[in-house]
Image (cartoon, rainbow, N blue to C red):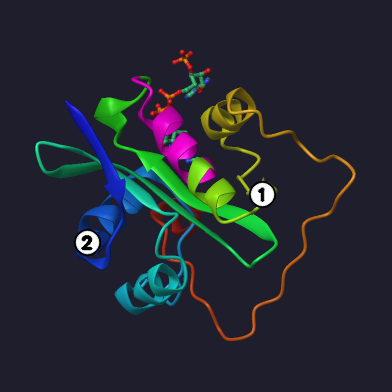
Amino acid sequence: MIDYRLMNIDDYQQAYDLWILCGNGLNDKDDSREGIEKYLKRNPSTSFVATCDGRVVGVILCGHDGRRGIIQHACVSPDMRRLGIGNELVALALEALKNEGINKVLLVAFKKNEGGNAFWEAQGFTLREDLNYRNKALTELVRIDPDYTKE
Ligand SMILES: CC(C)(COP(=O)(O)OP(=O)(O)OC[C@H]1O[C@@H](n2cnc3c(N)ncnc32)[C@H](O)[C@@H]1OP(=O)(O)O)[C@@H](O)C(=O)NCCC(=O)NCCS
């Protein structure tokens, strides 16, 4: 039996362990306990966890800037995939964004992540071939996801 509820900072360690296991892109500041606590304080009603017997088996970080929603760090434990958990987490996040008056939501996924991209396609997230994704670090960020350090 899977339960779904809002994520809170007490879920941090289990969520972090899952992100590391699932290969989500992480850095030392944004994904520290303090970083995630800051995010959840700013976005208290749009990030969710799935639990099974008290164990966190799925997470979705979701928030907005008052205009666009953004989804990050969606993941489901490898032993619990293809059961619809990711689908339900996305549905909860999208419903929460709609309740806050948000009309569009975006996300980024590594191109090499075929499963992840197939999942987002199935969720109706269209690929924007007409855009270049750009960003700029404002402080030094150290990537800490294991996949990245292997590259
Ligand atoms: C992507 C992820 C969150 C999907 O979670 P999930 O609970 O297994 O997804 P669901 O069971 O809800 O799948 C819904 C639909 O998405 C599609 N889908 C999901 N995973 C897929 C995969 N590996 N390959 C192809 N299609 C996939 C299917 O259409 C699936 O429906 P179906 O099972 O009836 O065919 C999970 O595989 C994961 O944690 N991956 C590693 C982290 C990641 O890639 N995160 C997202 C990128 S930012």
Against 123, residue 69 (above or below) is below
Whole-angstrom CA distance, mark 2 to mark 1, is 26 Å
Please identify the quarter of the rendering in which residue 32 is found. bottom left
Q: Which residue is mark 1?
A: 106
Counting residues from the start of the chain, the first of labels 2 and 1 encountered is 2
Give whichever of 12, 21 is nearer the camera: 12
Residue 116, x across and y down, in percent: 53, 34
Give the residue number, with chain letter if any, for mark 2: 13
**Residue 87 lies in quadrant:** top left
Task: Please tell me in which quadrant of the rendered image residue 13 appears.
Answer: bottom left
> How crowded is the residue under tag 2: few (<14 C-alpha within 10 Å), some, or many (20+)?
few
Residue under the image location 39 percent in, 73 percent down? 41
- In the image, what residue type sits under mark 2? Gln
Compared across the picture, whether 103 is left or right of 123 comes to right
Q: Could you tell whether 106 is left or right of 130 in the image?
A: left
- Residue 79 falls within the magenta-colored stretch: no
Q: Report the residue at 40% width, 42% height from top.
A: 75
Q: Which stretch did the figure color magenta? A: 83-94
Q: Which residue is rendered at x = 65% and y = 53% of the image?
A: 102
Residue 82 image offset from top left, x and y in percent: 38, 20
State the quadrant of the N terminus. Answer: top left
